[in-house]
Amino acid sequence: MYAQMVDTGAKRLRTSEEMSPEERAFQERIDADIKIEPKDWMPEAYRKTLIRQISQHAHSEIVGMLPEGNWITRAPTLKRKAILMAKVQDEAGHGLYLYAAAETLGVSRDELIADLHSGKAKYSSIFNYPTLTWADIGAIGWLVDGAAIMNQIPLCRCSHGPYSRAMIRVCKEESFHQRQGFDIMMTLCRGTLEQKAMAQDALNRWWWPSLMMFGPPDADSVHSAQSAQWKIKILSNDELRQRFVDQTVPQADYLGIKVPDPLLKWNDERGHYDTSPIDFEELYNVVKGNGPCNRDRLRTRVKAWEEGAWVRDAALAHAEKRAARSARKAA
Amino acid sequence: MTEWPLWEIFIRSQHGLAHKHVGSLHAPDSEMAIKNARDVYTRRNEGVSIWVVKSADVTASSPGEKEPLFEPANSKVYRHPTFFPMPDEVKHL
Amino acid sequence: MNRDEQLFDYLLRIADSDLVLAQRLGEWVGHGPVLEEDIALTNVGLDLLGQARLWYAYAGEVETRFAARGRCEDELALLRDASEFRNLLLVERPNGNYADTIARQFYFDVWHRLFLFQLSRSGDARVGEIAAKALKEVRYHVERSADWVIRLGDGTDESHAKMQAAVDELWMYTGEMFESDATDQALTIAGIGCDASALAHPWREQLSSILSEATLTLPTGAWMQSGGKRGVHTEQLGHLLAEMQWLQRAYPGAQW
């Protein structure tokens, strides 16, 4: 997901007896669905895990602006250009809300950004794939935002107050994102043969990376149990992935394009679609930095940040000058 | 250099309602904070008025004080209209 | 040219400037100096794009009065060549560094507000309505860009130098905003357009006051570039259009 493979520092769950009284009280509050707010006591591991998770999520929004931003200047109509600009702008807003949620945990945005730029912090693997055609903008909205919403709606109920409030705001704003993506796909699929081929090609390239967005299989997710106990992860990777497949396949059918999985089949017994095994080696490699665009994406972010330094400094210097002037006047 | 300070943003969504906390953002000073708040938090016509307060200037009650601060109010149920049951046939109360 | 043809041309001048500047601002999305600014600048771009679409829509209607059919916004924006574009040279200048972008925006915004204010009282009801709507947005644009000119001008030594260089560099593209050609004059007399040359004085006044607050020097160069209104552009516009129009050109007739 936008936050994949978040390290909780815990290899196994601790029993209630193993917990300190504070920790036990904390867990009881979570079990009772009481939100944890900034000044509340929280275990250090919970705080650190949340910082990792929320910042990964925030970084994903910010890096995620790049593949879509790649098409703002080439959008095929003025209407599509306006919608895409508004959408990418929303993503900047979402990154901002999420950074602010992380900042309540005692870390600054600059520190988080430094971790992104140094490669220490991760962001979703999906944004390391290139947007090669206009159909990719459709596919991102339809598949990537579709997958993101699936994960984010349950997170609105997560145990951390600021994170859950940020998620509520994000979900509210994001409702149009998936639809605009599907709308692009629909238009292409009803268009010329070339356009339909473009849509099929986009589905071919984005399908598997979209499934990988949900993270490693549950069996390999050592940290999921702890995150679930803390209610900062509500549904498991495989559960979400299955829901996504079940929801998306009929949509592809409607579009008249084919999901690139020869083994994809409805399983009546399970009441779900069966898929081919996912190549998680690819996921691990993309997360490690070996995706097609990792280096470009990071370089672009670092460049924007470094080239903006004098602007940020100037604004602050001006604010200080002005404060000093009005202080002198008052004296 | 140092980071722009963090501001807490309060927005009045409609005339007649109170300002409500909507989130935070960074800005070099209060003027810019208001402008940024307009761009960040009212992109969908959410507001008619904006307040900004430096986060560092907010003093928050600490959770440990919850009982002395809020318990007394709990015992004053008569402050709530539901304390006074009304017969169903009496309307507009 | 008859009156409608002149009006059509006039509407394209406005729409093209809005669109080309919006396109330039679109290049910034995801690359701004700070997240808050990325969002704010995109809002300006979205406003301008929205305004361009309103002007194109009206231009298309006016076109039906003298041509077999009126073109839609996408035909006008994405299927005319550079020599048919009527935008100001100023707005096609590249983004450069943030000071360059702010200087371009500031010069344009101050002019744009004065211009739209005049148009909001146009004898042509549609022109008046669109201008009045756009004016509300542009008032805010001016505040923002003036604010940044002051912050960067009166910020650090580095930002001061960059801001001064930017206002100097773009100065020669400002004269065109106040040129009045036959189209301007005819539409001014008809009570539809506005006398561009009359905007020069208030523009300069407002500019001087902001620049002086920003501790910047008002550029003095007297030689001005012009050509945008006649479709003679800088080399930059061709590249901008090549990128912007590419899909429409590569797949003629397709719906998107």
Image (spheres, coloured by chain):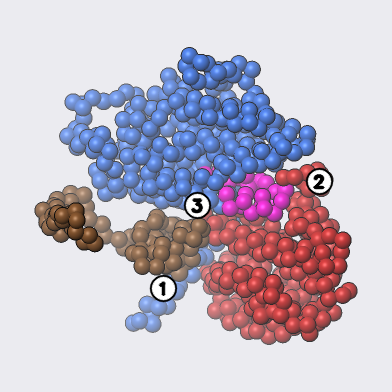
Give the image location of residue A20, x and y in percent: 19, 32
Within the magenta stretch, is there residue A70? yes
Q: Which residue is drawn at 72% across and 76% down?
A: C124
Within the magenta stretch, is there residue A186? no
- Say left or right for A273 vs A112: right
For the residue marked with disc 2, what is the amino acid?
Answer: Gly
Chain represented in brown:
B
Q: Within the image, what quadrant is residue A78 found in?
A: bottom right
> What span is colored magenta in the figure?
A61-87
The CA distance from mark 3 to mark 2 is: 36 Å
For the residue marked with disc 1, what is the amino acid?
Answer: Ala
Q: What colour do you see for chain A?
A: blue
Q: Of residues A281 and C179, which is closer to you in this image? A: C179
Q: Of residues C68 and C119, which is closer to you in this image? A: C68
Chain represented in red:
C
For the residue marked with disc 3, what is the amino acid?
Answer: Gly
Residue marked by disc 2: C253
The CA distance from mark 1 to mark 3 is: 29 Å
